[in-house]
Structure formats: structure tokens, C-alpha cells
Image: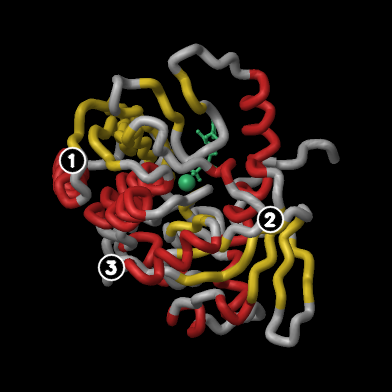
Amino acid sequence: MEFELIDQLKFSAPVAPGILLGIGDDCAILAEDASNERLVTTDMLLDGVHFVYDYDKKNAQSLDLIARKSIAVSVSDIAAMGGEPQAAFLSLAIPRAWSAEQAKELFDSFSKAAAKLNVSLAGGDTTSWEGLLAINVTLLGTVPKSEAIRRSGAQAGDVICVSGPLGGSLAGKHLTFTPRVQQACWLRKHCKLHAMIDISDGLLADLGHILQESGVGAEIFSQQIPITEAAKCIEDSQSPLEHAITDGEDFELLWTMPEAEYQKLIQIQEDFIEVHRIGTITQQTGCFLIDPQGKKERRGNEGYVHQFANHEN
Ligand code: ADP
Ligand code: MG
């Protein structure tokens, strides 16, 4: 539902000349100057959905962690284009019941988080209301001209890679992850990447975005998918592999590159870059998961989707 609505906007929005890429990727790309392009992304985070602020402070997700996540998710979108973050605009809807001290703590947390993530707070808006804490961060970044890595460039034969283990982020990683800016910039400079996205909705869902935008399909090999310790420890009806491919908010990079570039990458790769080869882009559309016995299973874009009520009944 969420994605159908976004598609509808995408095809009805007029594109002005300076907008090189509008709706549909991790960031919009705007023309800047002779050497750089401007990246823009925005994300909204809500208490009860993206974080849980514990008013009694018994089991608190601290404001430091909440502020950090709120900026880091946008930094991750800039990384997904191969860019570097610069200026953030922070809009806050603060619960009226908060004390002045709580509000000050929130602002302090944002100052610290921005400094840690190499971002300058350059503006925003502050409101109060009867609802829970709501946060919007709009982040501007920069990328060398024509070098942004889009979701739409994957080609049949490309190797599919991820930058780290996946799944179980609810156990903590969704608050503490490090956006892969350094890795993405290094990859952009040293290798020819065809497509990239950051994994926010889950591996299958975000690979699905690359496949849809590129008009191709994929085969991914279950044995090659790196799985976090957190996903291996979850005791529920889903296997660790299912968690790794469907859980959201890993914020690892997912990219595709020609085989020859992959071979070059593993020769020159530096220690701070994890590269896990998980599959291949195919001409035939659809995403297939292949088990160690070679059995193929067609998979959909399963992952986290924001739902709306059904008012028809
Ligand atoms: P991400 O997970 O990388 O943040 P999203 O799934 O939130 O990306 O959004 C996908 C694309 O749709 C992005 O280009 C985003 O800017 C666009 N988008 C999402 N919601 C809206 C909206 N309400 N109006 C216009 N564009 C939107
Ligand atoms: Mg993204």
C-alpha cells in the first residue's frame, strides 16, 4: 500500500529541470555546480513505531539513542547514493506534557548526535502537541557530479553484495548502527557499482526496489546470506535466515556490480569494508532464493510496510 501510493506520486509529479532524480530512490539528486550534485533525503520517526521513549525511564530508550537514530537513518540514505552528509534540518513535535528539562535534554541529544555523525544542524522547526514525540530530519549531502549510485542501474550478470550481517535489528542494532558512509564512498571511488540501496525495509523488500527500478530479477543463495548473532538468538516461529531476509532496519548497504569489478574489489578491499556476495542479477524478473540443495523458491518483496486501515467493511 505504502509503495503503491509512492508510485502514484512518482508518476504524477512534474520534474523541474534542476531535479536530476525525483521520487523513487534513497535521495533526490539536484543539480549543484560544475563538480558536485546535491543529495536530499527526509525521514520521519515516531514514538511507538521507530523508537519507544519510556516516560517512566524504567526501561528507557534514551533520548541520546533516539536522536542518534533519527539522524543516522538519513545519513544511511546519503551513503546509499555514495554521498557524504552535510546539513540537517530538524523538525520536532514535542509532547505538551514534557518539562522544559526534557525538551532541553532532547536538543542536547541532537547536538551530540549531529556532531558524532559529522552533520551540521542548519535549521528546523519546533512545535508542541497532545501526541507523542515525532521527529523529522531532512538531510542534505553531496556527491561528485554524475557519480551518485542509483537503484536503477542493476544489470543481468551483476554480483549482489551486502556490507554486513542481517536480521534481528530490533534487539538493538536499529538504534546503534553505524551508517556506512565511509564504505560507500570508498566503493564509489574504487569500483564501478551499478546499483545501491540501504537496507531499511528488509533484504527482500529493498532488493525488490533495485529489481523493480532496474527491470531485472535476482537469484540469492541462502547459504551465503550473512546472519547476525541477534537473529540467530531469536526464539520464534521464523528461522534466523527468514529474519535476515525480512527484518527491517539493518541499515547495511546492498549493491550490485559486474563480476570483473567484484573480483577487483576483493583484491583491493580495505579492512573497514565488509563484502558478502549473496547472489546474481538475472535477466528473468522475480527474486528466487536458492537453498544449499539447489532448490529454487520464488520470493516476494516481504519486509516492513506501513499499513493503513481497511474501511470497506
Ligand atoms: P527510504 O527507505 O530509502 O527512506 P522510502 O521507502 O521512505 O525510502 O521512500 C522511497 C521513495 O519515495 C523516496 O524517493 C522518497 O523520497 C519517496 N517518498 C516517500 N514518501 C513520500 C511522500 N509522502 N511524498 C513524496 N515522496 C515520497
Ligand atoms: Mg534508503
User: Does residue 237 sit above or below 42 in this rendering?
Assistant: below
Q: Could you tell which of marks 3 and 2 lies nearer the N-terminus?
A: 3
On the image, numbered disc 3 is attached to which residue? Answer: 270
Residue 257 lies, in percent from the top left, at 52, 56
- Return the residue found at the far right: 313
Residue 78 in view (yes/no): yes
Checking the image for residue 107, the label placed there is 1
Q: Quadrant of residue 96?
A: top left
Secondary structure under badge 2?
A: loop
**Residue lying at 55% horizontally and 16% vertically, measured from the top left:** 15
Query: Of the residues under marks 2 and 1, which one precedes in the sequence?
Result: 1
In the displayed structure image, the side of residue 90 where residue 276 appears, left or right: right
Q: Secondary structure at mark 1?
A: helix
The chosen color scheme is secondary structure
- Lower sequence index among marks 3 and 1: 1
Q: CA distance from mark 3 to mark 2?
A: 32 Å
Instruction: Mark yes or no: residue 102 visible.
Output: no
User: Measuring 29% from the left and 20% from the top, which residue is drawn there?
Assistant: 33
